[in-house]
Image (cartoon, coloured by chain):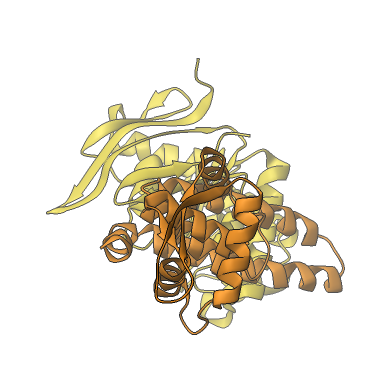
Amino acid sequence: MTVAYALLGFLEEETRHGYDLKQAYDALFGAGRPVQFGQIYATLGRLERDGRIRLAAQEPGQGPERKRYEITAEGIDELHRWLSEPEAPEPHLQRTLFAKTVLALTTGRDAGAYLDAQRGAHLERMRELTALKTGADLATALLADFALFHLEADLRWIEQTRGRLDSLRQEVTR
Amino acid sequence: MNDGIIDAKGLVKDFGTTKALRGVTLTIRGGEMVAIAGPSGAGKSTLLYCLSGILQPDWGTVTFAGRRLETLGEADRAALRRREFGFVFQFGQLVSELRAVDNVALPLVIDGVRRVEATHRALDWLERLGAADVARETPDELSGGEVQRVAIARALVTGPRVVFADEPTGALDSIAGDEVMTVLTEHARAQGITLVVVTHEPRVAAYMHREIVVRDGTVASREAVR
């Protein structure tokens, strides 16, 4: 899912072809896990089918003609909706939280507002879990603790990132 | 219309060239449990001390139940703190020479309650907080969690309307921290006490009704009153 939104974010900046998009993705999000060309082209195909992007031009290359894509109004709406909504708090969200923060910065949106909303969603889930374990049997309490420790780690990362947004913006938009 | 038990408006506090608070405005309602969160050095503790009358802000006002704290003299503010507020600090701050029960009875004795009566009430609170078995021990004989239970008993024994806690679990492991937060919030809820807790730990903030985040001496975000 994150790859599709990342491509929409890159295409909101300017029209690009598949090779450019892979380069942009790997530069921001590919640390240790570069995205495969096949995934880029499959994702572009789905986004085009769903009306989120469209073909802007076909350019001659050394091999087959290269397709240059542009984002549609529906694509911008979809990206904005995704960036505005906090994720449902659950363990192992780090790649998505990072992608949302960076894409909010690279597309000129308010990453701080997103992180604040995500913080609120996480804390609300932590309140539910804290209430759940109060007076519960030990097994239930320990399961709630497992989720609480993971959510707390996310929240610490959110706080750390919130405090360094200006530096991150300079780094990812230069 | 404002039904806050504590209203702060435009609080500014400097320490030399360090601007600890840069204009904080907030309202806390009676019976609410509020976390003041944020990174180290953000101004959380300074805000707590201004709200509770321990520190005077350089600018701005704090109103408690309709009384403007800055209009009170030091003696009146001290009496207000003793009778209306309870305090729990990170390391308990118990008097090391006194037994646990005498630490809990101390604010009552200072306020003129007879020693026998004060001790009786102190023992009652230690019992309620699950610390009766350490009543006759001195603080250096207690674990960190026991110290905080005694500190909570001392904060509650006067029947305060507000308890202020500054990193109450900061010196504890997570199990003892959970136990301390459970007894603190259970008794605050049962007594209808307003609870204001400074913390940098999200797991502690999750015990509260809502969170006010302080960064660089200002309120960076706040959740809606619920």
Question: Who is closer to the viewer here, B199 or A119?
Answer: A119
Q: What residue is drawn where x is 41% and y is 59%? A: A16
Residue A120 location (% of width, % of height): 57, 48
Screen quadrant of the C terminus of chain B: top right
Question: Who is closer to the viewer here, A29 or A150?
Answer: A29
Whether residue A13 appears in this view of the structure is: yes
Residue A14 location (% of width, % of height): 37, 52
Q: What residue is drawn where x is 58% and y is 67%? A: A41
Q: Is residue B53 above or below residue A100?
A: above
Question: Number of marks in the image?
Answer: 0
Say which colour chain B has: yellow
Tell me if B219 is positioned left or right of B148 in this view. left
Tell me if A146 is positioned left or right of B209 in this view. right
Q: What residue is drawn where x is 41% and y is 25%? A: B67
Extreme residue toward the left, this view: B17
Residue B39 location (% of width, % of height): 39, 61
Extreme residue toward the top, this view: B1
Say which colour chain A has: orange
Question: Who is closer to the viewer here, B4 or B107?
Answer: B4
Q: What residue is drawn where x is 62% and y is 60%? A: A45
Q: Is residue B215 above or below residue B172?
A: above
Whether residue B164 appears in this view of the structure is: no
Tell me if B17 is positioned left or right of B187 in this view. left
Residue A63 location (% of width, % of height): 45, 76
Question: Who is closer to the viewer here, A73 or B206?
Answer: A73
